[in-house]
Image: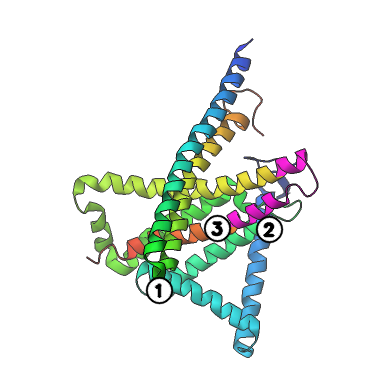
Amino acid sequence: MNLRIFGDPILFQLGPIPITETMVTSAVVTVILLAVAILMRSLVRSWPQHWLSVLAFLVVESFDNLVEEIVGRRHALVATFAGSMFLFIAFCNIAGQLPGVHPATGNLATTSALAAVVFLSVPIAGIQSNGLWGYIKHYFRPNPLLMPLHVISELSRTLALAVRLFGNIMSGHLLVGLLVALAGFLVPTPIMALDLLIGLLQAYIFSILSTVYIGAAISAGEE
Amino acid sequence: MNDQTIIAIVAMACAALTVALGAIGAAIGESRIGAAAMDALARQPDEASSITRTLFVSLAMVESTAIFCLVIALILLFANPFIGSAGQ
């Protein structure tokens, strides 16, 4: 029975750095995504009528539309950010369905790193669109007394992003593992289908929420 | 019954209570969100895409409280700092 909740086994040592299973899984997912993206780019350039090119165009267009609905205008950088987040998390979650693979997002360290990226992107996007003073000013609005609440809300939503993704993916994987140990063949299949759905939904939620946070920072000075 | 046994019993009972009570709140909240979304969809079918998006986001936000409870329960069971040889 391969149940793992908080641990992360070390596969081998690379000099002083221990290489854990999660690092290998996420690196493999990243390499696959990069290879597919580079191949798609050359395919779209050389053969735009091919159905794969149309599919790639549809994916990019849907992220652009999503960002336009949330932020209020087309924003290529935010769309890239949201799309990368969605694809990486979704592929990590789907990779967890392969036998023997533990999903990289089922580890609190990975999800904390992703949430930290969102946490750092929010002030960067806000300062880029409103200037340093315009962004800092929104912390003191509507009243300077509310400044601690703004800071607490930024910290707590980062924590919630990390723990939500981790909890969902880890609990889904744990449930499938328990069912395999208890009942074995074919019984866990519906739960695995549910796990797949939840994985895609959580990837969508993560990218939507990060877009909402970044969009709020971008429009912080416009009122 | 030594101290470790008592701590283990209390931790197990607390883990069960955490998940049970946490699930009640999330279930009530999600049912209200679902009902409100159905209502909004029946009134404004044209806004279906934006209602569905908001529905999923709010369902996930409410669901995350239950997930937090689950994580706390799993910490109590598998990574309890007060039980000597627990954790991995």
Q: For the residue carrying disc 2, how many other residues have a C-alpha within 10 Å: few (<14), some (14-19), or many (20+)?
A: many
Assign the C terminus of chain A to one quadrant of the image: bottom left
Q: Amino acid at mark 1?
A: His
Q: Chain of mark 1?
A: A
Question: For the point 76% across and 51% down, which residue is it?
Answer: A100
Q: Are marks 1 and 2 on the same chain?
A: yes
In magenta, the rendered stretch is A177-199
Judged from the image, the secondary structure of the residue bearing numbered disc 2 is: helix
Sequence-first disc among 1 and 3: 1
Sequence-first disc among 1 and 2: 1
Magenta stretch, overall SS: helix
Question: For the point 79% across and 44% down, which residue is it?
Answer: A184
Q: Position of residue B50 (x, y in %)?
A: 41, 66
Dot label at residue B17: none
Q: Within the image, what quadrant is residue A65 found in? A: bottom left
Judged from the image, the secondary structure of the residue bearing numbered disc 1 is: loop
- Disc 1 designates what residue? A75
Q: Amino acid at mark 3?
A: Leu
Q: Are marks 1 and 2 in contact (CB under 8 Å)?
A: no
Q: For the residue carrying disc 3, how many other residues have a C-alpha within 10 Å: few (<14), some (14-19), or many (20+)?
A: some
Classify A205 as above or below A74: above
Q: Position of residue A160 (x, y in %)?
A: 46, 47
Q: Within the image, what quadrant is residue A26 found in? A: bottom right
- Disc 2 designates what residue? A95
Q: Is residue A151 left or right of residue A21?
A: left
Q: CA separation, marks 1 and 3?
A: 23 Å
Q: CA separation, marks 1 and 2?
A: 30 Å
Judged from the image, the secondary structure of the residue bearing numbered disc 3 is: helix
- Disc 3 designates what residue? A201
Residue B19 in magenta stretch: no
Does residue A211 appear in this view?
A: no
Does residue A185 appear in this view?
A: yes
